[in-house]
Image: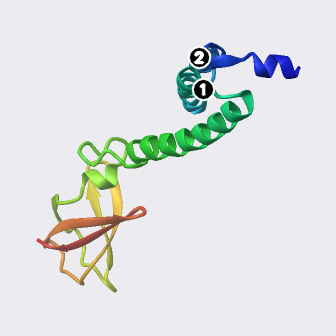
Amino acid sequence: MLDWFASFGGWGWIVLGLVLVGGEMLAPGVFLLWLGLAALLTGAVVGLTGLAWQGAWLVFAGLAVASVVIGRVVTRHRSDEPDTASGLNDRGRQLIGKVFRLEATMTGGEGRIRIGDSSWRVTGPELLAGTEIRVVRVDGATLVVEKA
């Protein structure tokens, strides 16, 4: 078994990297991609420097950790931020900035408005029925409003 590790060499790392990157197409997520890139880089380092198998595995371990961390930062930044332009599937966010007419007087800073076929709970200053209000933000399923 030790002979297999010793003979792995730069091309072995490159083949392993290509297998891992190819395996990404079969497995959900993007985890194998980062390990594959680490293996490809390890193959390049081993091919250029002629590192022994112990050094190659240490380089791979370091590159694998670094590539996974960098990959998570890169993909998290893009996927965790909501699409603020469209507000797709977030009806409340689509209403921010829009002006509506208050149907009933708000008492205790709370009331309800009708938007299309939906009734929304609103909070804000006490206002009389018929007052134009503007949605300033959404707090869960409640619209926070101010006088327009």
Q: Is residue 37 above or below residue 78?
A: above
**Quarter of the view holding residue 85:** top left
Name the amino acid type tagged 1: Ala
SS category of the residue bearing label 2: helix
**Quarter of the view holding residue 74:** top left
Name the amino acid type tagged 2: Ile
User: Which residue is found at the position 79% from the left and 22% from the top?
Assistant: 5
Residue 22 horizontal/vertical position (percent): 58, 15
Q: Depth check: give the residue in front, 146 or 61.
A: 61
Separation of disc 1 and disc 2 at Cα? 6 Å
N-terminal-most mark, 1 or 2: 2
Q: Is residue 25 above or below residue 111?
A: above
Residue 100 horizontal/vertical position (percent): 17, 61
Q: Which image quadrant: the C terminus?
A: bottom left
> Are the residues tagged 1 and 2 within 8 Å (C-beta)?
yes
Q: Which residue is label 2 attached to?
A: 14
Q: Depth check: give the residue in front, 110 or 1.
A: 1
Q: Which residue is label 1 attached to?
A: 39
Left or right? Give the position of 55 relative to 98: right
Residue 145 horizontal/vertical position (percent): 24, 71
Q: Depth check: give the residue in front, 48 or 37.
A: 48
Residue with the most extreme right position? 1
User: Which residue is found at the position 31% from the left and 82% from the top?
Assistant: 109
